Amino acid sequence: MEESYGSIPTSHLLGSVPAVISEVKSTTNYEVPEANLQIFPPNSGGDKGHGYQPLGRPSETFEQQPPNNWKGVFSVSSYTQYFNVDTDVVANRLISSLNPVAGDFFNKIEANPDLYGLVWISTTLLFVLASLGNLATYLMQKRADSSTSWNFDVSYVNAAAYSVYGYAIVVPLAYFFILQYLGSNAKLVPFWCMWGYSLSVFVPASFLLLIPVEFLRWVVIILVGTSSASFVALNLRSYVEGSQGSDLSILVFAAFFLQIALAVFIKVWFFA
């Protein structure tokens, strides 16, 4: 029994394993085909964006589609682009609105017309007229009668809101529809932007109207109204120049006198 056990061949034991493996490796040639990885299912090239794309192809960017129907008017996201301005842009446009003879305001805002100036300037003017109008009335009454006591008239707030917001929104809207009717390729947002910045000159002028001298008040409001009206008329003329002719000239003169009428209304109602 011991001899039979001793005669068992040992070539397949531990010592011979490396030799067997090396022999198999030497006699077998594994060729790895070139990798061509593609995600299933591949893009057929028909409809873009459907299915998976092959590796290495740049992904398409998603662009926000502008609203193409009337529902976009009631979407807040439709107006976010018109508030995408910084302090430097607003300050530059405010300075331009104080230069009535330039006539290039539409060229400056053509790339990015904003509604921030319209909302901010109109709201500021509203509170300035309501507060300083009450103060001016008190000073005039105090000058005539020293026993007059301070009384805040809330109706000044309502009058300022209706007049300022109504003028800044309705007048540009009316001009937009009229010019569209006459065949001009007018845009509404630049009109709102221009008329909104045209009201900025009335904010510092309201502080000058606190002077309790009626003659000086009329001088201030006439100068300020003429400056604001010239800014609107000259820019509107440059915007519609060469479109229709005499019909648009009448609209330019009408815009000038509407701005003067607003100035007179501010003086008579708030600083009488």
Image (spheres, helix red, strand yellow):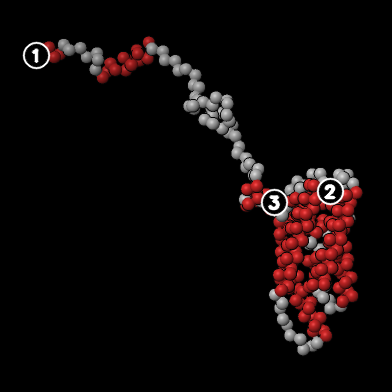
Residue type, label 2: Tyr
Please state which of the two labelled residues, at mark 2 or mark 3, is closer to the viewer: 2
- Between discs 2 and 3, the one toward the N terminus: 3
Q: Mark 2 points at which residue?
A: 239
- Between discs 1 and 2, the one toward the N terminus: 1
> How far is the residue under mark 1 from the one under mark 2?
118 Å
- Between discs 1 and 3, the one toward the N terminus: 1
Is residue 44 found left or right of 129 in the rendered image?
left
Q: Nearer the viewer, residue 111 or 158?
A: 158
**Residue at point 9% right, 13% down?**
1
**Label 1 residue SS:** loop
Q: Residue 269 is drawn in which quadrant?
A: bottom right
Up the image or down, 188 lies above or below 130; here it is above
> How far is the residue under mark 2 from the one under mark 3?
20 Å
Up the image or down, 62 lies above or below 165; here it is above
Q: How crowded is mark 2: few (under 14 residues within 10 Å), some or many (20 or more)?
A: some
Q: Residue 47 is drawn in which quadrant?
A: top right
Q: In which quarter of the image is the C terminus?
A: bottom right
**Residue at point 82% right, 65% down?**
262
Q: Name the residue under label 1.
A: 1
**Residue at point 70% right, 75% down?**
154
Q: Name the residue under label 3.
A: 82
**Residue at point 22% right, 14% down?**
10
Q: Nearer the viewer, residue 155 or 35?
A: 155
Q: Residues within 10 Å of mark 3 (few under 14, many from 20)?
A: some
Is any part of residue 107 visible from this angle? no
* Residue 249, percent from left and from top: 89, 51
* Residue 76, percent from left and from top: 62, 52
Is residue 193 found left or right of 264 in the rendered image?
left
